[in-house]
Image (spheres, coloured by chain):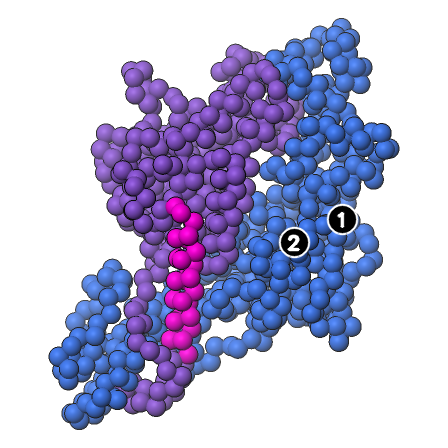
Chain colours: A blue, B purple
Amino acid sequence: MDDAMNEGARETGQAPVPALAVDPLLDDPSVRIVVCCGSGGVGKTTTAAALGLRAAERGRRAVVLTIDPARRLAQSMGLTELDNVPRPVPGADRSAGGELFAMMLDMKRTFDEIVEAHSDPARARAILDNPFYQSLSAGFAGTQEYMAMEKLGQLAARDTWDLIVVDTPPSRSALDFLDAPQRLGSFLDGRFIRVLMGPAKAGGRAGRKVMSLGMAGLSLFTGTLGKVLGTALLRDVQTFVAAMDTMFGGFRARADATYRLLQAGGTAFLVVAAPERDALREAAYFVDRLKADRMPLAGLVLNRVGTSAASRLSAERALAAAEVLDAKNLASNGIVDHPAGDDASRSGRRSPEDHSPAAPGGSDAPAKTGDDASDRLAAALLRVHAERMRQLAREERTRARFTALHPEVPVVEVPALPGDVHDLAGLRAIGERLAGRGDQPTFA
Amino acid sequence: MSASGNPGIGPATRLHVVSGKGGTGKTTVAAALALALADEGRRTLLVEVEGRQGIAQLFETEALPYAERRIAIGPGGGEVFALAIDAEQALLDYLQMFYKLGGAGRALRRIGAIDFATTVAPGLRDVLLTGKVCEAVRRRGKDGADWAYDAVVLDAPPTGRVARFLGVNHEVAGLARVGPIHHQAQAVMRVLTSPETAVHLVTLLEEMPVQETADGVAELRAAELPVGAVVVNMVRAAERLDIPLPERDPGLAAALGRAGLRGATRLAGPLLAQGREYAQRLALERAQRAELAGLGRPVRELPLLGEGADLAGLYRLARRLREFDWAGGA
């Protein structure tokens, strides 16, 4: 049924999905920023690292900006210190004239650096010592997005690298960082910040009274805030906001500039997903969102795609053949070597007719011991194959839903590796597969 | 695994916080757990806080409003309610509840104060979300004697952020050293660190999620938050491969031929290679299971749903979860 359709699904579908050519993208000197976005757990960071490595080994001076990578992946790129500075990655092949750098975003450090760069020492001290600032910068929800935007702007402003590969923060929506300028803007343009800052500028409690004289309405708010927050906290908030005012303004201008940079021709967005329902649903959302923001989408990277070098053999045929061998085994030994697998997936699925494949050859000959062993091996391998073909069919169906929604989005499939990646060789192998040059499925 | 001595679905644990690395299916597990805990005559509340409408998608209903509404009946016969907490609404609620600030609340919104509180101000958003969850946990039923909900299941932020998310009130209690916020934050922390709460971590049998789970357990313990069970999701039914896999088997092609397959000689190599990859994966999974067992928490395994987490699959998971006990903590 569905399993048997697997192979034909691509042909029976609508127009073929355009292929995403990764190497031309990485080689294009006008492409200066590649942003990888996608939901958590789809191999986004690994994809970013593999793209950076491949670009570097093809001659570009690339830097990978990652946010909170898994420890082993960080180690694979030689990122042992979290010092917020791009570090050269030892072991990347430099023979093509390129070089690879990698850095892990340190939110607090990035934040502190902005404060130090944009205020005089006394004011910087006041901000850095403020307890409110200290918890903000330590990384509550949202801070990562601002800081990723800021760091990307900083890296882009320097001429040190000709390609920046960005791994977006693992937030609910990895595109939240696109909202950063706007969110800050609505806050900074609002009256609230003026309400908060008024009293602080005029000096604490006394200031609040002064302000309430002129603006009767506003005293309600500060009074309310005092009640809600407690006076001491309100004072901390006011000091903090006042001190940050100038800095926030500059930050917003820079975030706006980075936003426009992302919309410009030198940027390519890659949506990363795995062939699973949730991941592809998120991917569809990202594609829509990028369109709405007029961000240049290069295509979809579909990670961990199952492949089989024997995909001509359907799950049904494989299982039927395994049954034949089981029956022979039973006949010759009186033992059923029947694996106990997932009852729901196998029993009840097949009808008795399916059990009979084309005439088994040579079944009359008395079985020898060596043949028995080979039969058992063959039966086991056929069941493993059937399971894989079912998985492939599931992936294909999941994928078809995405393709139906977005037939125009170019796709590159990255065949699954048996294990996780923890070194440059692993990243290189992923890079090969991204470029469509890994060991491709061949058909038996 | 059940040697942990947990005495069945106990009355002690009433707040089940479900976290996990992205992509492990924590929303699905949270929903299945809410269904599983809804025994005859019991009510559970399933809460989401990330504005993703994941619950509505799972239960194939319209987007959830900021209101508790019944969305399902659990396989045990009890009612499951759902709530998508919206930080802004929670803040207005909070202002109304504690300060009777209906009108002023709206004014605060007009001048951007609510925006500030829910998006820019450090941690306030998380304070509001956890505060609302704890309010539901502590709420009394209509008769005043029983709890409004026998259990509350929270679809929490991912493992990397969950300790900070739950610990936010601790931090806030430090920032606001006196006053109503201080008291509120402390009250929330009391619930979250009590035996009433258990934080379950969802993982897959893969290296990175398992590593992140181990890190998460350590972080939660450091924050003195009660770690519940480790839920291994999407476990694939393993074909038993308990026969030795040779490098090559000269008889394999003939055996495939005997099974009636054409082109058997060309199949033998690829099938054997697939078998070896499969054995490699099983070995990796065994190693991950051992790693998880070493965390000292009960481990629960859930099967991979072939067709994704549709409603039927969700109930299948719920029935499976009912076979385990969910008294975390102790």
Q: Nearer the viewer, mark 2 or mark 1?
A: 2
Q: Left of B219 or right of it: where is A342?
A: left
Tell me, for residue A66, which label it has, or none: 2
Residue at the extreme right of the image, as rendered: A120
Examine the image and state in which quarter residue A343 appears.
bottom left
Instruction: Output the chain of dot 1.
Output: A
Q: Quadrant of the N terminus of chain A?
A: bottom left
Measured along the vertical axis of the image, is residue A175 above or below residue A318?
Answer: above
Q: Decide: few, some or many residues near mark 2? Use Cα within 10 Å; few <14, some 14-19, many ≥20.
A: many
Residue drawn 39% across and 26% down? B137
Q: Which residue is mark 1?
A: A153
Magenta highlight range: B273-297
Q: Left of B147 or right of it: where is A403?
A: right
Measured along the vertical axis of the image, is residue A82 above or below residue A219?
Answer: below
- Amino acid type at mark 1: Gly
Residue nearer the viewer, A360 or A339: A339
User: Is tag 2's residue or tag 1's residue first in the polypeptide sequence?
Assistant: 2
Q: Position of residue A417 (x, y in %)?
A: 50, 69
Q: Position of residue B142 (x, y in %)?
A: 31, 17
Q: Quadrant of the C terminus of chain A?
A: bottom left
Measured along the vertical axis of the image, is residue A303 above or below residue B213?
Answer: below
One can see residue A50 in this view:
yes
Residue nearer the viewer, A81 or B140: A81
Callout 2: SS: strand
Examine the image and state in which quarter residue B116 appears.
top right
Magenta span: chief secondary structure: helix
Residue drawn 68% across and 50% down? A82
Instruction: Output the chain of dot 2.
Output: A
Q: CA distance from mark 2 to mark 1?
A: 14 Å
Tell me, for residue B22, which label it has, or none: none
Specify whether residue B248 is painted magenta: no
